[in-house]
Image: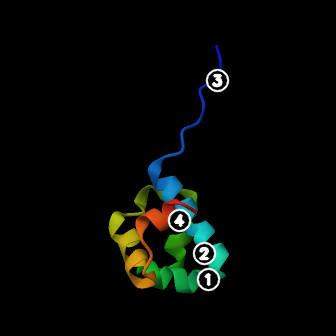
Amino acid sequence: MAKKAQRITLHRRIWCKIRYWQNLKDISDAELASYLQVGERTLHEYDKSAENVTLGRVDNLLHVTGMELNDLMAL
């Protein structure tokens, strides 16, 4: 029996897009944390498990940066 392919959850996909955007824009963890309105330690927790990234946090980022969700997901 073939091994089942590992599914990438929506939480993980969004978090990876955020981290990729951060890298592209050369934004520090401290600055990203302030955009999301969380502590820097929380960013590292999201790296381990993105399940706790809420739509409210993503909305904070989008609002502060003027970015649209479609822009983030298109990265």
Q: Which residue is mark 4?
A: 45
Residue 25, x across and y down, in percent = 63, 80
Residue 38 in view: no
Identify the disc placed on residue 3. Answer: 3
**CA separation in Å, label 3 and label 4:** 28 Å
Of labels 3 and 4, earlier in sequence is 3
Whether the residues at callouts 2 and 1 have beta carbons within 8 Å, the answer is: yes
- Left or right: where 59 falls relative to 47: left
Q: Nearer the viewer, residue 29 or 39?
A: 29
Q: Which residue is mark 1?
A: 27
Q: Which residue is mark 2?
A: 22
Of discs 2 and 4, which sits in the foreground?
Answer: 2
Amino acid found under the numbered disc labelled 3? Lys
For badge 4, the amino acid type reads Glu
Query: Could you tell me which residue is drawn at 43 percent across and 77 percent down?
Result: 61
Q: Residue furthest top?
A: 1
Q: CA distance from mark 1 to mark 4?
A: 18 Å
Which residue occupies 50% across, 80% down?
Answer: 33
Q: Where the C terminus falls, by quadrant?
A: bottom right
Q: Residues within 10 Å of mark 1 (few under 14, many from 20)?
A: few
Q: Nearer the viewer, mark 3 or mark 1?
A: 1
